[in-house]
Amino acid sequence: MPDAQTGRPLACSIGDPAGVGPELICKAWTRREAEGLPPFFVVGGAGLLAQAASGRGLDVPIEVIDDAADAASVFGEALPVLGSGDIDYSPAEPSRGGAKLALDSLESATGLVMLGEASGLVTGPVSKGLLATVGFEHPGQTEFLAHACGIAADEAVMMLAGPNLRTVPITVHCALAEVAAMLSIRLIGRKAMIVAEALARDFGIERPRLAISGLNPHAGEDGKFGDEEARIIVPAIEALRAAGIEASGPHPADAMFTPRARAGYDVAICMYHDQALVPLKALDFDAGVNVTLGLPIVRTSADHGTAFDIAGKGIADAGATIAAIRMAGEMAARRAMHG
């Protein structure tokens, strides 16, 4: 079990309390034994978690703990919560107060992992727009974590992982019209190297196979639809191969996600956000995990948003939250095993 390997629990930030995060954390706790989940605790929101569980008809005892180290002994009988921050549970009614709790929880949970008091971080879904109203200055949680860990934003790589696909967007939170100008041989090469190193270290894939997409339709079709493939992507792939990385491409994005194509690689590296996320969400929406690679800490998150429209209705699927907790535990165990 991952917790036996690390000796430390996972820390979960609560996410926006008006979204589905609180109820899915509670649902995950009720399935801890069936799913073989490692011990975890939530930072803040003891009262709202109790209300969220009750509203969904879940029997989830909540126990407030004073130290992260107490989580493991509590976890079997109650959901451990660290910290006194709280707010009334108002599903589907986002507020500045809720955003403040989400930010406080994220900052505190991140700090606990960086201090070594928790083995990894599982972040709840947040509303970036609401966070901005309470002082959050980053495009997303990935960029926040890079800043918190003292690394450049492009050194933190977002990978989406599910049972059927792992995929990485080279450019993330930007307008589609800006993508071509943002691409460079260095950017593709550096992110691909981080991905290869992380798959070996955190996922146990000794020699990862990277499939790299083109940017344009038909991967440019020999320059007919654009020259980014020949000018940027091909040289990046050649540099990766020269460095000993098993990289292929550029592949036409419309053909690289078929079952036969997916059997030939361990991760698909794509040029922009939707090119990577559309296939992942089509294949693995209820089990997709957002993993941040390149950090000195382990971080995962369910690959979905706050879903304010269904919050509190008891219909949100906990599969991705469970998968994120399990994956964080497995990654932490591998890091502990290999030092």
Image: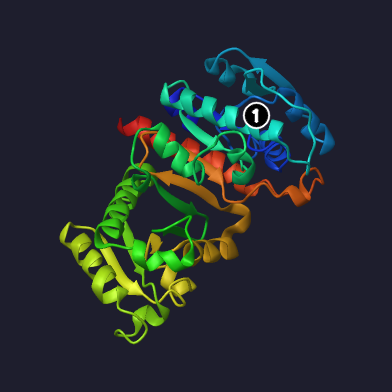
Question: Residue at the bottom extreme?
Answer: 224
Q: What residue sits 26% from the left and 69% below the top?
A: 232
Q: What residue sits 36% from the left and 74% below the top?
A: 251
Q: Position of residue 306 (x, y in %)?
A: 67, 46
Q: Looking at the picture, does residue 288 appear above or below residue 153?
A: below
Characterize the local packing of mark 1: few (<14), some (14-19) or many (20 or more) Cα atoms within 10 angstroms.
many
Left or right: 83 with respect to 210?
A: right
Q: Looking at the picture, does residue 11 appear above or below residue 221?
A: above
Q: How is the image coloured?
A: rainbow
Is 325 or 290 nearer to us in this picture?
Answer: 290
Q: What residue sits 54% from the left and 37% below the top?
A: 136
Left or right: 92 with respect to 136?
A: right
Is 66 or 78 nearer to us in this picture?
Answer: 66
Task: Identify the element where label 1 is drawn.
Answer: helix
Left or right: 197 with respect to 173?
A: left
Q: Position of residue 93 (x, y in %)?
A: 78, 41
**What amino acid type is highlighted by mark number 1?**
Leu
Question: Residue at the left extreme?
Answer: 242
Say how many tags the image has: 1
- Residue position for label 1: 101
In this view of the protein, can residue 133 be seen by the observer?
yes
Tell me where residue 213 sits by quadrant: bottom left
Left or right: 242 with respect to 118?
A: left
**Image quarter in which the C terminus is found:** top left
Q: Position of residue 158 (x, y in %)?
A: 44, 50
In this view of the protein, can residue 271 be seen by the observer?
no
Q: Position of residue 109 (x, y in %)?
A: 53, 27
Is 310 or 152 nearer to us in this picture?
Answer: 152
